[in-house]
Image (cartoon, coloured by chain):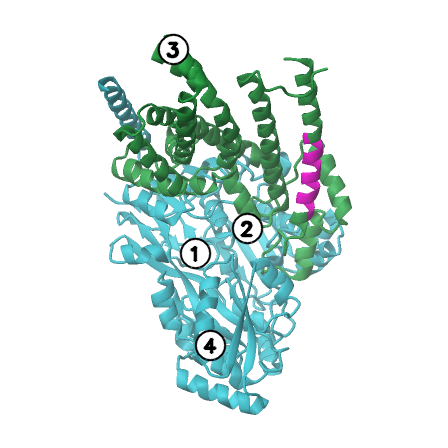
Amino acid sequence: MSKSTVRYILRRLVISLITLFVILVVLFCMVRFLPGSPINNEHLSDAQRAAIEASYGLNLPLPQQFVKYMSGMLTGDFGVSMNLYRDMQVSSLVATRAPISFFLGLSACILGTLVGILLGVVAALKKNTIWDTLATVLSVIGVSIPSFVFAMLILMIFGTNLHILPTMYSSSQPIYSAIMPIIALSMSVIANVARFTRTEMISVLNSDYIMLAKAKGLSRKDIILKHALRNTLIPIVTILGPILVNLMTGTMVVEKICSVPGLGLLLINSIQASDYNVILACSFLYAAMYIIMMLVIDVSYGIIDPRIRLGKDE
Amino acid sequence: MKKLLSVVAAATMALSLAACGSGSGSDGKTFTFASELDIKNLDSCDADDGMSFNAMHAVIDGLMGLDENGDITYALAEDHQVSDDGLTHTFKIRDAKWSNGDEVTAHDFVYAWQRIIKNVGNYAYMMGTGGASIVGADELMAKTENGEELTDADLETLGAKALDDKTLEVKLTSPVAYFEELMTFPCYYPINEKFCEEQGSNYAKSADAILSNGAYIMDTWEPGSTATFSKNEDYWNADAVKLDSLVMNLVQEPAVAAQNFESGINDYAPINSDLVDQYKDDESFISFNEGYLFYIQVNFNNTDLQNQNLRKALSLSINREDFANNVLKDGSKEANGFIPAQLSIGPEGQDFRDDASDYTEYNVEEAQAALDQALSELGKDEVTLRLLYGTDESPMDTMATYLQNAFSKLKGLNIEMVATTKQDRIYTKQANRDFDLACTRWGPDYSDPTTYLNLMITGNSNNYGDWTNAEFDSLMSQIATEADLDARWQMMIEAEGIAMSDYANIPVFEKGTSALKNTAVKGLVQKPVGVPYTFTYVDIEG
């Protein structure tokens, strides 16, 4: 890795930290400006509610609350849940759920990308044949039908009717019980990657250097694997970042259907309950993930295609 | 291609085998209960939701409990004496053990009740005049509300004392006719002081941080997913427990819960109104009263709404039966008064609703006539009212839409819909009296009619509409101190009559719940008040 690349990564890291701080400030204020409070038991009198709010420090001025939150956060203390799982440590709530969501998102991304590339390559190589049409139809279905519909379908067929897959996520069978949500989540990835791969592959196959490779007498396998596929992959990497982040942040509906105790569901439930600390921790984690992901994607450009230089050379 | 097919076939077979393995494994009877709500908390100091109550009651008994028929019976108490003035209750605690081997003692109750006040628990108010009326509770709560730390000396002023290890004495500020029933409520459960102090802030935050003295022991608890329980062999009433294990699964999607039920994964699954038509003729289909009353709160600060004929017109224009049976379809019933049916049983064993009159009716012609009369009295051609509702508190949005449609049929009445969140509805708009009509609801704290009637007392914190009636207030004061149960019952019927005849609030429907229950399952006790489900007596036949 060149010095300029290291400098570039360091600069991006500093910018990322500043961005995260700004996001935290904005999130903190926005969450506090939500109507109502996490203490929303309508059976409580105003005085009783105020007393409970005071026990969580919600009666302090906003800047003081922020400083208290930040100082706790720097030591790994994200506070306690004020409503959803009252008085439970937010860090432990998030720590048990984040890996599940990450695993699902990442697995769906890997599966979807591999299958998508395969479908796209087949469609491009067998252009205008039944295989191409089949791959295109699959892509259109994958893009058009939301992942939760797939989840319901798979659940009904493989879970309820055939009893092949469990209908609920279980921590005692974390991989086996995650198959269904992973397949459901990967459908849109397959569709997007397949469409993209097909277009790119056709474009690459028609380019001059492929003609030259053919003229040099290289085998079809070498042309596809060593030249065409590698050049097709570069643009695909650009769409993988947003796809992965969308997968991780967009798992909540599938999580709900497949009863997966994931981060997405925790975030949605915490917003409904105005559980300040849980909302903050989940949103912050998503923001951090997004920023890290974009950084990783940017750096990976340079690795996949050495022609792309990160930072300025001295 | 052949290779690919054989790989797929092998994978399918492997998965099928794995699936077969996952469904079996434990011997004996297991009841699997699916819920769309999660267990939030197992600390009787903090828990305030039905699912947490279900889980908590599976592992902890209170002084009183429910028998197989849902009637109140002794649990950890084996005897209960009340003084002639009704102000001193003495409980004898039976021989029972915590799951760490300690004896359950009267001190466990005193500690738990002091702790809920000291920690400003959600249900601390149930210790004071809002519930059990225990001596000193209101004063202690006033201190915590002022931000004062309670000392041990302060807590000693609470009127709950352990006379010895097995005798608990509770002194009240006024007689509480429903005191025994209150003692079934989780906020009055005992806590083992030694264990609780050892656990510190982790108490009841995980399966191994809570002790059992009840029918089951909690083995695992994964928030957001599942909780498993096994029979407590040392339970004082172990002979009554037929199950070997109990599983509570969080399934937030009712359609999935129904599918799981059909495939035998769950023995019990709640379903929503979308699924009722599909299952209503199935023998596993059940529906019951949830205990919640959904009603319209009228803002009496609005000069138009001070007109009784206008309020009468609003009430008469609602076809409650149609709304409950054809729109909600979830077991909900039309409300005939402010006290829901199947909530309160009188001294002679009769339901309050059977003794009281019906105060609701659907008659569009009479509604129009009442509105015309109101407009004439107000000197207006038309009236515009804002209908406030929360979009995040289903089925409040459905109710608001139905009401808008019903009210709009009256000529001279315009409705403006004000959609917001539940929080904003209650704590901003209703609290600031910034509404005309508000779709709201109330769930009972206990099964005495006063849990609803108190809402209409002048100055009650939930009386956001500021309805006031001296006769009603006076009657409620008498009810609070009346020791004669028959006289008290009649007074409550009279009080409801005063409020409903004046359209203090407009009741709409009593919320029901529909569910699918395995027909082999017997003994699941369901109650609209307090702990929704008691699993102690559940048995699976066959």
Residue A227 lies left or right of residue A19; in this view the side is left
Q: Which mark is residue A272?
A: 2
Relative vertical location of residue A44 with respect to residue A78 in this rendering, above or below: below
Residue B18 percent across, percent down from the top left: 31, 26
Q: Mark 2 falls on what kind of element? A: helix
Separation of marks 4 and 2 at Cα, in angstroms: 30 Å
Q: Which chain is green?
A: A
Q: Earlier in the sequence, mark 4 or mark 1?
A: 1
- Do the CB atoms of the residues marked 3 and 4 lie less than 8 Å apart? no
Query: Which residue is nearer to you in this view: A230 or B220?
Result: A230
Q: Quick check: is A24 in the magenta stretch?
A: yes
Counting the numbered discs, the total is 4
Q: Which residue is mark 3?
A: A215
Separation of marks 4 and 1 at Cα, in angstroms: 46 Å
Q: Which residues are magenta?
A: A16-29
Residues packed near mark 1 inside 10 Å, few (<14), some (14 to 19) or many (20 plus): some
What amino acid is labelled 1 in the image?
A: Thr
What amino acid is labelled 3 in the image?
A: Ala
Q: Residue at x 60, y 71 (%)?
A: B435
Q: Which residue is mark 1?
A: B73
Quadrant of the snapshot with the C terminus of chain B:
top left
Q: Residue at x 58, y 60 (%)?
A: A42
**Chief SS of the magenta region:** helix
